[in-house]
Image: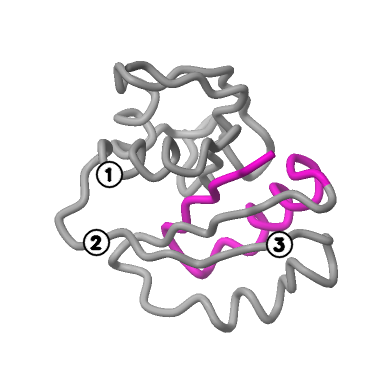
Amino acid sequence: MTTIILIKSVEHHASIREILGSVVDDGERVHFLRLPTVRCLGPLIQEVNPMLNYGVDYTITPLPKGYDVSTLVEFATEFDANRICIGITDRTLTGKARIDDLTQSILLYDDISGDFVVGEHAIILEDLEYGD
């Protein structure tokens, strides 16, 4: 299996830990895909330590400036990703996860579909299927 973890901030350690600890399987391939606004994942990766603490193989790939959802879906398609995971960055006053524009764009994109799961710190689109 292959999982893409979309990194919108290096401050979201809890979402990365939740994804690696309860979503990703041991030995799975993980692609940390960082937004252009995220400068460096070094400290986050050192603290979380995906290989030692979670037994996963990983890569870090930056999205290009000016990316759009089709860029992300092309990346997912290229690696035949089974999941796209996104940290929850905002909540409503009642504590529900607020869907940001990027997450909404992924969910509404025509060429990708899957099951939508909301965890404590992360939103997961899993069992992905790709259009033509």
Secondary element under disc 2, as helix, strand or loop, is loop
Image check: 51 left or right of 122? right
Sooner in the amino-acid sequence: mark 1 or mark 3 = 3
- Identify the residue position indicated by label 2 in the image: 64
Which quadrant is the N terminus positioned in? top right
Residue 70, position as x, y percentages in the image:
25, 36
Question: Residue sitting at 37 percent across and 70 percent down?
Answer: 38
Placement of 28 over or under 102, stated as above or below: below
Which quadrant of the structure image shows residue 98?
A: top left
Label 1 amino acid?
Answer: Thr
The CA distance from mark 1 to mark 2 is: 9 Å
| Image color mode | one colour
Residue 78, position as x, y percentages in the image:
42, 42
For the record, the magenta segment spans 1-25
- Identify the residue position indicated by label 3 in the image: 57
Front-most of residues 93 and 26: 26
Sooner in the amino-acid sequence: mark 2 or mark 3 = 3
**For the residue carrying disc 3, how many other residues have a C-alpha within 10 Å: few (<14), some (14-19), or many (20+)?**
some
Dot label at residue 71? 1
Which quadrant of the structure image shows residue 94?
A: top right
Please report contact status of discs 1 and 2: CB closer than 8 Å, yes or no: yes
Label 3 amino acid?
Answer: Asp
